[in-house]
Image: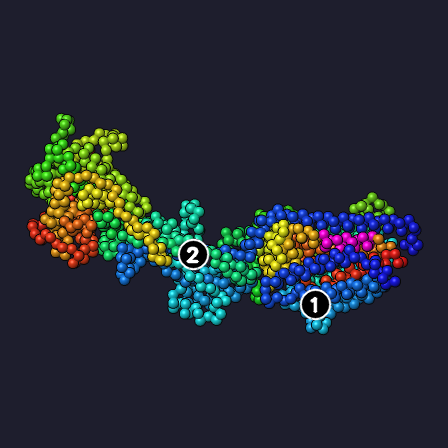
Amino acid sequence: MLERKLEKLDYLIIFCVFFVITCGIITLFTQEINITDGQGRWYKQILFACIGFVAMFLMTRINYQFLGSYAVLIYAVSMVLLVLTLIPGIGYLPMGRGARSWLKIGPFSIQTSEFAKLATVILLGQYLVIKEREIKKLSVLVVPFLIVLLPMVLIYKQPDFGTAVSFLPILLAMLFLGGADIIHLSSLIILGGITLIVPMYVEFTKLTLVQPLVEYLSKTDKIELVSLVNQLGGKTWLLLKGKTVKLGETVVQIKPILMDALKEASDQVIDENTGFLFKMFINEDLMIGLGIIMALVSLVLLGLRYARGQVQFRKYYIPIGMLGLSIIAASFINKVAPFTENQVVRLTAFINPEQFKQGAGYQLRASKPAIGSGRFFGRGLGKGEMTEGKTPHVPESSTDFIFASWAEQTGFFWSVILLFFLLAIPLRGLQVSFESKDRFGSLLAAGIVALIFFHMLINLGIVLGLMPVTGLPLSFMSYGGSHLIMSMIAVGIIISIKIRKHAN
Amino acid sequence: VENRPSSSTEFKLEENFKGRLYFFSIIIVFTLVIFIFQLFNLQVVNGAENFLKAERFVRRSEALPAARGQIYDRTFSSPEKSFPLVQNSASLDVIVNTGLFKNNPEKIRDFVIQFYETLSVPKAYYENEVIEPKFTKKIKSRIPILLLQGVTPAQHERIAQFDNIGRYVFFLPTPKRIYNMGPALAHVTGYVGLPNTNDLKNSEIKSYQLVGKGGIETLYDQYLRGTDGFRYQRRNTEGNIEEEKIISHASMGNNLILSIDRKVQIAAYNALKNFRGTVIAMKPGTGEVLALASNPSFDPNILSGKNTQARLLHLKRVNKNGGFLNLAIQSRFPPASTFKTLVGLAALESEHKINFSPSQTFHCNSRFMLKSSSSVVPDQEFLCWDKRGHGTNDLTHALEKSCSVYFYNLGYKLGAESILYYSRLFGLDKKSNIDLPGETEGFVPSNEWKKRSQGMKWFDGDTINLSIGQGFISVTPVGLALFYMALVNNGKVHQPYIVSEMRNPLDNSLVFRTTPRVIRDIPLKASTLEALNQGLRMVAKTGTASRLLNQPDLPDIAGKTGTAQTKRRGQSSSNHAWFVGYAPFGAPVADQVLVVVFVEHGVGGSVGAGPIAKEVFKAAFPPGTFVKKDKIEGPKMDEELPQGELEEEP
C-alpha cells in the first residue's frame, strides 16, 4: 500500500525543488568562500532544507482534505502567532534585517508571516469551495477580502510593507481561479490601482519638484529657505500642509513671513512645472467632492434601477461608483496619510534608479550591473565581487537579491537554466491543480501555485529591475528557514493532492 | 440561491476553471519569457557595459599624483651650496570624512563648528564658505569637504586633541610648489596652476594636475610633470577601503638645473627694483644665461596657490602694471647709442668699399648738416648730445664719447643698406630662441618696408637717425646681447639658454645636458674687433660710463651706454636707458660675462642703466675672482645726456 503511494510521488517537482535549493546553497557557500568570518549561512540553509524535506514528505502523507477541515483552526493559529509577534518581548526585530518581525521559540526564530500566507491560502481555498456557486455575486467577495485583510494589517504593523502587499495578488489569483466575475475583479483592480497610484503619483511629482523649488528660492531674496528646503527634501510639502515636520530630532519651526514666502514659491513652482491633472489631484477637497458626487450619481442610478426597473444605466452605475469611491479613497490617503518619501522611492526607483542615489535606488543601481557583469558564462563561482562578503555591494545579496548573486557568478546560461527549474515548480503545480478531481484540491493547489509564483514574479521582477522594490524572498533560493520550510510544506501539499488525485 | 447544482452548471464551472488555469499557466510562461529577455538584455546585450559599471562599484582607480621636478641653479654640482630655486613641499589639508556620516549631517556640522572654534577661525568665514546651503547635500552624497589648507604644526597639535579625530577627518598631503626666489626669478620660472581648457586638449594632462603657466614651467612642462601612478581601491558599501593595490607608482618629474647664478640674479633684480626694466647677464663663451630679471614682476608663490582673495588681488595688480611681460624677450626698443658699435662695425668691415679706416676722423661741433638734394626742402640739422661738441675724433674715441656727429657722418657715408645688412646679419630682427616662451623679435626696417607701410621712400634723414640707433629700428634686449656676444667672441654667437641640465630625481643621473651651440659665425676682421673692443673699453675706462664703472672693486669693463629717445619730446625722464657691456676686458672669453641693462624712462644710459650694470658685475665678479689690468686713470667724462633735439622722422 505504502509503496504504491510512493510511486505516485511527483518526482519532477521534487527534483526541481532540490535543484533550486542546491543552487541557493551553492550561492550562499560561494558568497562566504573568500572571507574567514562568515556566518555559515550555507550550512544553516542545508539544515533548513533538511527540515523542509522532512516536512514536505510528512505533508505528502497527510490527506490534504484534512487541511480543508481544519482550515479555520490553522488560520486562527497563524493569526494568533502574528499577534504574538507584535507583542514586545515575544516578537523581536533582529538587527540589520530591516522590517521583519520574528517570533522566538526556544532556539528557533520563526517568521510568522510566512505561515500566515499558507494558512490564508488554505482558508481562502476552503471558503471559495463552499461558496463555489455564489461566487459571481459581488457580496461573496467581501469575506475573502476580510480573510486577507486581517493578516495584511497585522503584518503591516510589524512593519513589513512588502509582505503585507504580497497578499493582494494571491487574493486576486485565487478569486480569479475560484471563478469570480471578471468585471468584479477588474473593478477591484481599478479601484485599488487608483487608490494607490494617484497618491503615489502626487508624492512622486512633489519629490521631483523639490529641486525646481530650491532653484526658484535661490533666485528670490529668501535665501535662508534654500538650505531649509534642501535639508527637508520631500518633507517640505508636509511642512507646507501645516504638518509637524521633524528634522533629525528637532521639530522644524518656521516664521510666518518665511512660510508665506515658501507657499508663494511653491505655488509658483507647481504652476510652472506641472499640468492640470496634478493641480487637480493636490486639491484634495475638490477631489473628495468629485468622488462624492460620482458615488451619489451611481447611487441615484442604482435607486432608479430598483424603483423603475430601468436597466439601461446598468453598465454605468458600477464603474461610476467604483471610480467615485476610489477617488475618495485616494484623496483621503493624500490628505491624511500621504506616502512617505521612502515608500515613493522604493516603489518608483525601478523606473529610473539614477534619480534616487540612495536607498532603494541604490539597490537597483547595484543589482543590475551585478547581474549584467556575469555576462554569458559568469564571473565564476566564488568570484562574485558585487555580491560576496559581509557587506556586499548589492544589499541583501543572500536573501532577496540572491538571484543577482547567482547571475553574477554563473552568467546568462546557468541563470536561464535556473529560471526554467524555478518556474517549472508553479507550472507543475498548475498541472496538479488541473488534474485534481476534487474542487478543494484544485483550488488549494492553484492557491499555492499563486503564492509561490507571485513570490518569484515579484522577487525576480525587482532583482531584474522591472518592478518596485518591496522585499520578498525568492522561494527555495533565498536564505531563511521560515520561507523555505513554508514553501516546501506548500510543495508537499501539492504532492499530496497529486498522490490522491484518483483517491476520491 | 440554488442548493442543487445542475450537471450543466457543474460542467460550465469546470470548463471555466480549466480555462482560467490555462490562462494562469500562460502568464507563468509569459513571465519566464520576459525574465529571460531581460536577463539577455542585462547580461548579453549590455553585459560589457554593466561589467564596467560593476567595476566602478567594486574598485575605484585613483591617481597618485607625481611630484613635479624641482629646479636648481648652477650651483647644483656643489651640493653644500645647492639649494633649489623651485621646490615641492607637502601642504597638509584637513578633509571631512563624509562617508561615515552621510546619514547624520547634523553631527558633522556640530563637529565642523567645534573644529573651527578650536582653531579660532572667524565665524563669518566658515558660515559662508563651509557650512553653505549645499553642506548637507554634500555630506549626503559623500562629497569631501575641505576644512583647512596648509595645516601649521601648531594647528595640527590643537586638532589632534579632539576625541576620535580620525573618525571625522583625514589629513591629505597635497603637493605645493615653492619658489624660493619669489618675484626675482618669476619671469624665468613662471608659475603653476590647474590646466585651462586649452591645456586639457593635450591628452596627457589630467584635470587635477598642475601645469606650468609661463617660463620654464611651461616650456619644460612635459619633463617636469612626471608620470602619475595609479592605485585600485576595493571599497565596501560603507565606502571604507577593503583592499588597496598600487598598480603603478608615481614617478617624479625630472629636475632641471639652470644656468642661472642665484647671486647675480638677486643682484640684478634688487638693482632693478625701483625701475621698469630688465637685466640679462650671460656667458658669451657658451650662451648660458646667468641672470634674467625683469621688473615689474609677480610672485609665483601666490599665483601657484589656491584661488583665494589674495591671489585674485595679486593677479589684478600684476595685470594692471604689466608684470607678466618679460621685458628681456617680449619687448623691443630703439637701441640708441648701443647701435653705434654696429655702425662702426659695418664701416670697418666695408672699409675698402667706402674708403674708411679706424683712424679716420670726423669733426664734431655738436651739429651735423644734412644737405638737401632739392631746393624746395631745407637742409636738416642733426645735433650731438653734447652741445659743446666733441672735437675731432677717430672711431675709438667717438665710441668712447658716444659722439653722434661722428656716426652721422659715418652712417651717411656708409649708407642705410649696409647698416641694415649688418643688423640682419647679427640677427637683430630675429628671435634668439632662448628657452623661454613668448619671445618676440626685434625690428629692422628696410626701404621696401617703409614704402609699403608709410608710402614714402627711405630718406637720408632716416639713415642719419639709424646711424645712432634711433628711428625705425628696435631691438629686444636679448637680441642686442647676442650682437655684443659676437664682438666678444670673434663673431661667434652662441644659442642663449637657461636650462643647462636635466636630471632624474631618483639617481641624479643625467637625462640631458645642453651643449653650447654656435648659431651664427660671422667672419670679422681682427682689426675690426680690436678697434671696436678698444672703443668699448674706453667707454668704461675714460668715457661716458667711466665714472661709475671704472672702480677698483670692479673688473675691467668694456661696454656702451645708450639713451633711447622716445617720442615724448621735452620730458627727459621719458628716455630709455641702455647699457651693454662685458668684463673682464682682455680675459679669455670663457671667463667673461656679458650684461645688458635696459631701463624704461631711465633718463640716460650711464645714469639709469650704469648703476644696475655695476651691481650685476659686482655680483658676477666678487672680489678676488678677477685681475685688474688697467689702472684707474684718465679724465672722467660727462655722462651722456639725452639728445633733446633729435629730429624725428620726416
| SS label for mark 2 | loop
Q: Which mark is residue B399?
A: none
Q: Nearer the viewer, residue B287 or A470?
A: B287
* Residue A94 in sight in this render: yes
Residue at the spot of label 1: A102
State which region is magenta: A420-434
What residue sits 83% from the left and 51% below the top? Answer: B17
Residue B442 drawn above or below residue B5? above
Residue A269, image x and y in percent? 57, 50
Q: Nearer the viewer, residue B240 or A208?
A: B240
**Image quarter (top left, top right, bottom left or bottom right) of the C terminus of chain B:** top left
What chain does mark 1 sit on?
A: A
Residue at the spot of label 2: B250
What chain does mark 2 sit on?
A: B
* Residue A239 in sight in this render: no
B444 displayed left or right of A460: left
What residue sits 37% from the left and 51% below the top? Answer: B223
Question: Looking at the image, is mark 1 or mark 2 nearer the viewer?
Answer: 2
Residue B479's image quarter? top left
Q: Amino acid at mark 1?
A: Trp
Residue A489's image quarter? bottom right
| SS label for mark 1 | strand
**Image quarter (top left, top right, bottom left or bottom right) of the N terminus of chain B:** bottom right
Q: Residues within 10 Å of mark 1 (few under 14, many from 20)?
A: many
